[in-house]
Amino acid sequence: MRELLADLQRFDGAGPAARAVVLGTWGSAPRPAGAVLLAAADGRMAGSVSGGCVENAVLQEIAAARESGRPKQLRYEVNDETAWAVGLACGGTIEILVEPAVSPEVRRAAADPLGSVVVTRLSDGARWRVREDKGIEGSMTLVSSVVAEALAALRAERSAEGAGLFYEVFARRPELVIVGAGHIAQELVPLARRMGFRTLVLDGREAFLTVERFPDADELVRGWPAEQLPRFLGPASYVAVLSHDPKFDEPCVRLALRSPARYVGVIGSKKNQEKRRAALRAEGFTPEEIGRLRGPIGLPLGGKQPNEVALSIVAEIVKDRYS
């Protein structure tokens, strides 16, 4: 839902937008729990709940819900014939909640840069919002086990249904923190932005770190990277150390490995990575901390050009994010 916030704001000009959200899937259903189809009062739509195979039927149900003012739960069996028509290998099942309007809790969660989970009681539509700082919004008390389940879903970044409740996750927008403003970083920034990442580039070399070289970056951070990096290390941080200069790279690797960052990758050959791991062991880093290091950075796709290396880095980050 967070990625549809701009659409929601545009759609509201025609009247309150309605929506459908995937509660759960079984088999090869193409969209995960939490996927949203947003519908404007004037017929515009954004998002998807099935990749196309049940969208028309869901839009009709959204129109009916808008007319009645009541939500409705739907269940679709995607048979093999329909599945092949949309490019799937086999069928699946999708459970969907249709709502006549986007709730205030969902709106606040989508607009909040911090992470939260909207908990919906499906029997009566009661809602609470559990924030990443463990704050809770709602008119009724929420039991501690539900709060714990919501926070677990937030950590996993996966919406889910269970025990009559739907946990809709609004994860904090991930941040890719790049150390080193070289050619790979130039290719990595626009690719990561397309994948939904906020991008920051750190470098102490003014000639490298320019708006002309990084027009798509959200933030350019000038200064000694090891001094700047700590303020960007959090549970939504993904760190790519790319300067290929030990005086920049090594302090940043050590800071990132002992931080809450979700991913730490560093450029360099396999031989240099072995030396780096040996040095970390000698310095007292634990096997778990060293095991967090992705080096050589990126999945081994075989590419050598900067854009190919950037693709391998994004691929590894996405893999780590959802594994």
Image (cartoon, rainbow, N blue to C red):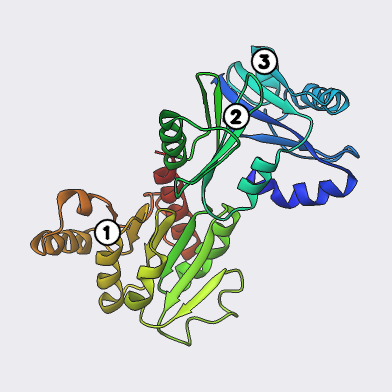
Q: Amino acid at mark 2?
A: Thr
Residue 254 to residue 291: above or below? below
Where residue 85 appears, x then y in whole percent? 71, 21
Side of 235 where 256 appears, left or right = left
Q: Position of residue 313 (x, y in %)?
A: 43, 55
Report the residue marked by disc 3.
75
Q: Earlier in the sequence, mark 3 or mark 1?
A: 3
Which residue lies under the disc numbered 2? 120
- Asked if marks 3 and 1 touch (Cβ < 8 Å), the reply is no
Q: Residue at x 15, y 58 (%)?
A: 285
Residue on which the image places disc 1: 257
| In this rendering, position of residue 8 left or right of residue 239 | right
- Give 32 or 302, whichever is nearer the viewer: 32
Please tell me the numbered disc located at residue 54: none
User: What's under tag 3, amino acid-wise?
Assistant: Arg
Secondary structure of the residue carrying tag 2 is strand
Q: Residue 21, how many percent across, how many down?
A: 66, 30
Against 255, is 27 above or below?
A: above
**Quadrant (top left/top right/bottom left/bottom right) for the N terminus:** top right
What is the quadrant of residue 22 in the picture? top right
- For disc 3, the neighbor class at 10 Å (few under 14, some 14 to 19, many from 20) is some
Crowd band around label 2 with a 10 angstrom C-alpha radius: few (<14), some (14–19), many (20+): some
Q: 112 and 128: which one is in front?
A: 128
Q: Quadrant of the C terminus?
A: top left
